[in-house]
Amino acid sequence: MAIIADSNILLRIADPDHPQWVTASRAIEVLRQRNERVHVLTQNFIEFWTVATRPCASANGLGMSPEMAFQELTKLKCFFALLPEHPYVFEEREELVLTYRVSGKPSHDARLVAAMRLHGISRILTFNVADLCGFQELKRFIPNLCWNKFF
């Protein structure tokens, strides 16, 4: 079965000093051992770049130069299966934001959910459950909770 790795998972894997690095890495390892296909979307890589190139942790960034961020993205591209950009993602997103009355920052999450729906994927590995809990289509895997509940 297929699952999307959220951008926060990619960011934790790229930062071995982060307290959630072990949890994110272990979650991916367990999924792969169970023959799960772990995918990412172009949006995940865009969000990764945005956070990775912010100057420091106090600005919610990793402080990477563009060259360093590119090197990390190159590694991630080899590690995860990148799904193609779907031509109807914008229309699907519009339907979601109207259905769920989404406004503000969560509209980014609505685009992610739209792409997942179009690719037929209903599971996401994330640390940000609250951001996605309004979208009833998703079954969320939460790596920092009890493994037996989700795996």
Image (tube, grey):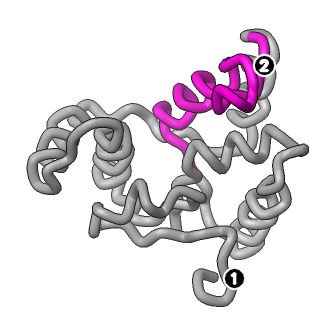
Q: What label sits on residue 147 in the rendered view?
A: 1
Within 10 angstroms of label 2, few (less than 14), some, or many (20 or more) residues? some
**Residue under the point 27% across and 69% down:** 136
Residue 126 percent location from the top left of the image = 57, 58
User: In the rendered structure, which disc, 2 or 1, sits on the residue that comes first in sequence?
Assistant: 2
Q: Are marks 2 and 1 in contact (CB under 8 Å)?
A: no
Q: Name the residue carrying label 2.
A: 64
Left or right? Give the position of 51 relative to 76. left
Q: Is the residue 101 above or below the residue 51 in the image?
A: below
Quadrant for residue 37, please give it.
Answer: bottom right
- Amino acid type, mark 1: Trp
Position of the C terminus, as image quadrant, is bottom right
Judging depth in this view, the residue of 115 and 54 nearest the camera is: 54
Q: Secondary structure at mark 1?
A: helix
The Cα–Cα distance between marks 2 and 1, rounded to whole angstroms, is: 32 Å
**Residue under the point 61% across and 31% down:** 48
**Residue under the point 37% across and 45% down:** 109
Q: Is the residue 15 above or below the residue 72 in the image?
A: below
Left or right? Give the position of 123 relative to 101. right
Quadrant for residue 70, please give it.
Answer: top right
- Amino acid type, mark 2: Met
Within 10 angstroms of label 1, few (less than 14), some, or many (20 or more) residues? few
Q: Secondary structure at mark 2?
A: loop
**What residue range appears in magenta?**
39-65
Judging depth in this view, the residue of 106 and 49 nearest the camera is: 106
The magenta stretch spans residue 19: no
Residue 111 percent location from the top left of the image = 32, 40
Residue 58 percent location from the top left of the image = 70, 30
User: Can you name the residue that lies furthest to the right here?
Assistant: 17
Residue 71 percent location from the top left of the image = 80, 21
Quadrant for residue 93, please give it.
Answer: top left
Q: Nearer the viewer, mark 2 or mark 1?
A: 2
